[in-house]
Image: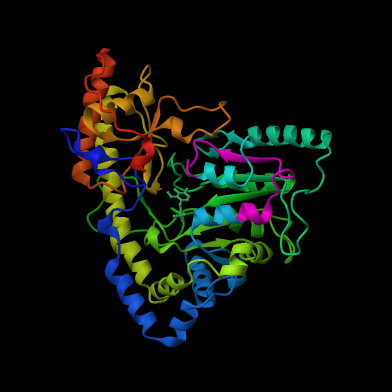
Amino acid sequence: MTTPESLTNTHSKSLINLLRGWPSTTLLPTQALSDAAQSVLADTSVAYPGLLYGPDEGHPPLRNTIAQWLTEFYKPSEAITKERIAITGGASQNLGGILQVFTDPLYTRNVWIVAPAYMLAFRVFVDNGFSGKMQAVPEDEEGIDIEFLRREIEESEKKAQEHGNTEATTKPARPYAKYYKHIIYCVPTFANPSSRTMSLERRRSLVQLARDFDALVVSDDVYDFLQWTSTISPAANEEFRTSAILPRLVDIDRTLSPAPAATDFGNTLSNGSFSKILAPGVRVGWAEGSAALAYGVSQLGTTCSGGAPSQLTSTYVERLLKQGVLDRHIRTRLQPAYASRWRCLVGNVERVLGPLGVKGPQSDREIVGGFFVWYTLPEGVLAEEFVKRCREEENVVVAPGSVFEVPGDDSISFERDMRLCFSWEDEDKMVEAVGRMRAVLEKMLKGEKQTANMNDGEMKHFW
Ligand SMILES: Cc1ncc(COP(=O)(O)O)c(C=O)c1O
């Protein structure tokens, strides 16, 4: 995940990395974490449980605090209880855990992935036996294409019937889990990479569809707390939102008629994480779903052996949440900083690259957020070539649309698209990068051949 020194130093221009989806180090709350760690370790009533094997479902006070905190932010019609929460080692670890507990690689027919998709999720599906079973689902400005998905799932079900695929054969029946026929994976709010937000109507239709076909929708709800208005020149004393833009799929699954029975597993799981709002290295996240589903998440073999993931850091996060420190950090540091970075990047791209035909998404959205912006290059300019030239001629690294295509399914491609990230580099670097990208784009539009050639290895060095 790191950039080798040799790659950054060979170019005459300094490296600017708009690919990396990490928080800027200037936004990591080191003092607050240090205070939380010291206060936990000085108090044996918290330090001892924190340093021992945690209960399978996770540090009980953190489950409680997260339940209250989510109730305040999402304002569901009924309060979220701690039984709906399991502590995880972050969204990535938990995606793997969900697949281990709730899927069977033969019985589970497909993993349906809204495309463009978060590219690092693909390997998790492959690790769990789903290579060759991943299928891309298109989205438009409103989000996932429900009719497409319904047609494709019906087709997949027909095939399963023909092959007599009627029960799980790889894994045994277990009281704490069930095996879903389908998995649907999406990022409904401020998506990585498309920066789109799925409309309320599509969210309702998606939950209904999941119920109709025995699917589990896993939504990575990891950017919901990072949101601001899309005005490029906001009021000086801008107020930031303290509640969610829309209900999550899990909120809808709880209330959509007919309401599920208390013992049901349900059809949605919210995969939450403190990586984007605190620090990825803390490796704490949570899963929310029905009480049965949350309990099932906690019954992973590795958890039953090793205790709840990230037990010690869970105690630090609990302090930060309980004392309101995390909320204050989000409101007073992260939202203003990311809003300013987003405005800097989007404003510059519009002004500098817009006249050359570069287009952004969902321009009429009132609230935006997350870490990324998705752009489409002008007609005739292929993103892979543009990205390669940006890297080799200008030492600017960005992600081409092809990286976000679902492996093994070439029905949906993103040849003219690219993702720019505004969370990692500072604003002056982003301004500089946009100017350098313009130089490349102008040359490509004039048909000028590539000038420099820097053999700088794999894209993954820059993630
Ligand atoms: C959509 C999405 N899911 C999951 C992750 C990783 O989350 P975590 O650090 O909690 O594993 C990211 C990080 O980029 C992401 O964008």
Q: Quadrant of the C terminus?
A: top left
Q: Nearer the viewer, residue 452 or 134?
A: 452
Outermost residue to the left: 12
Q: Is residue 80 visible?
A: no
Q: Is residue 411 magenta?
A: no
Q: Is residue 91 visible?
A: yes
x%, y% of residue 335? 32, 56
Q: Nearer the viewer, residue 100 or 351?
A: 100
x%, y% of residue 341? 27, 47
Span of residues in magenta? 98-120
Question: In percent of the image, x 47 and y 77: which residue is there?
Answer: 50
Outermost residue to the top: 447
Q: Is residue 166 left or right of residue 283?
A: right
Question: In percent of the image, x 69 and y 65: which residue is there?
Answer: 292
Q: Is residue 50 left or right of residue 29?
A: right
> Which quarter of the picture shows residue 12?
top left
Question: In percent of the image, x 38 and y 39: which residue is there?
Answer: 460
x%, y% of residue 364? 40, 38
